[in-house]
């Protein structure tokens, strides 16, 4: 199905192919990575591939390691693939429209933990620009970068830390490829501290990439080592008790920021 959707996009259609469990999207990496991501370059820009690969992450509910994996960093590693991860209903619609209208392949990553979130969504057609993050809460002490479902924990953590007179600036990336580096760097140069809440694994992850470019381009602005709040480098457990320890929470973000401020 994914290969057929890539072929349809190459002949002029705008395809959207849905993978209800992102884990099973792995079967389709050949048409996604070898075909869709490369054709524009391989034919000298004469043929684009306007396609959306819509992958849904199914976390929690004792679904275990083969049904709940967040694989955004794997896809973000591939040149020519854009990767978006909305955290609000408004952005979910706006980013999908932008992805469909884009002339190149876009991976749209949805998280089932957000499917119960309600918000105001205009009826008319509108776009949320790909590659542009947004400041959800302004602050002067710490820059907290997040995306997708963990964005909600980031906002809760910022509210909790405000009670301790720690003002956290919360950035919702919305797109992890390409990253809105300018927005992150501007914030870090103001606050001098960086925390990243990544809904994926720690090693070689999104949090590592963000921390690395901030270290490269804003080292002199840092007042303390950056911190990363992520999944542990382990497969998802098939136990509700272990899930509570496995998935990062508001408390984990609060403790990470507190530790950074104490330094």
Image (tube, grey):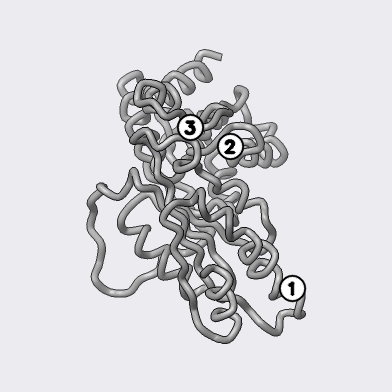
For residue 41, the mark is 1
Q: Quadrant of residue 233?
A: top right
Q: Is residue 104 left or right of residue 149?
A: right
Q: CA distance from mark 3 to mark 2?
A: 19 Å
Of pointers 1 and 2, the one earlier in the residue sequence:
1
**Residue identifier under label 2:** 207
* Nearer mark to the viewer, of 1 and 2: 1
Asked whether residue 256 is in view, the answer is yes
Q: CA distance from mark 3 to mark 1?
A: 37 Å
Circle 3 Cα neighbour tier, 10 Å, few/some/many (<14 / 14–19 / ≥20): many
Circle 2 Cα neighbour tier, 10 Å, few/some/many (<14 / 14–19 / ≥20): many
Q: Secondary structure at mark 3?
A: loop
**Residue identifier under label 3:** 236
* Nearer mark to the viewer, of 3 and 2: 3
From the viewer's side, name the closer residue of 214 and 25.
Answer: 25
Marks 3,1: beta carbons within 8 A: no
Rendered residue at 41%/65% (across/down): 96
Q: Height in image: 200 above or below 3?
A: above
From the viewer's side, name the closer residue of 258 and 248.
Answer: 248
User: Residue 229: horizontal and vertical position, in percent?
Assistant: 51, 29
Marks 3,2: beta carbons within 8 A: no
Q: Secondary structure at mark 1?
A: helix
Q: How many marks?
A: 3
């Amino acid at each position: 199905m994914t290969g057929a959707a890539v072929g349809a996009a190459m002949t002029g259609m705008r395809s959207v192919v849905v993978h209800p469990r992102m884990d099973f999207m792995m079967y389709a990496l050949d048409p996604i990575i070898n075909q869709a991501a490369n054709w524009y370059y391989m034919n000298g820009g004469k043929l684009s591939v306007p396609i959306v690969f819509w992958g849904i992450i199914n976390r929690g509910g004792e679904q275990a390691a083969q049904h709940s994996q967040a694989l955004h960093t794997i896809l973000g590693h591939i040149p020519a693939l854009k990767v978006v991860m909305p955290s609000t209903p408004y952005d979910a619609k706006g980013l999908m429209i932008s992805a469909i209208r884009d002339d190149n392949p876009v991976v749209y990553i949805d998280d089932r933990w957000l499917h119960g979130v309600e918000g105001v969504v205009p009826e008319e057609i509108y776009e949320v620009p790909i590659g542009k993050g947004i400041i959800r809460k302004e602050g002067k002490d710490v820059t907290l970068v997040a995306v997708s479902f963990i964005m909600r924990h980031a906002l809760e953590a910022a509210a909790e830390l405000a009670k301790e007179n720690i003002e956290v600036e919360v950035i919702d990336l919305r797109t992890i490829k390409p990253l809105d580096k300018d927005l992150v760097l501007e914030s870090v140069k103001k606050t001098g501290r960086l925390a990243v809440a990544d809904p994926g694994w720690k090693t070689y992850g999104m949090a590592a990439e963000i921390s690395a470019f901030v270290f490269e381009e804003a080292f002199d602005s840092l007042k303390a080592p950056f911190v990363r709040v992520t999944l542990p480098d382990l497969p998802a457990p098939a136990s509700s008790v272990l899930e509570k320890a496995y998935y990062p929470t508001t408390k984990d973000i609060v403790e990470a920021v507190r530790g950074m401020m104490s330094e």
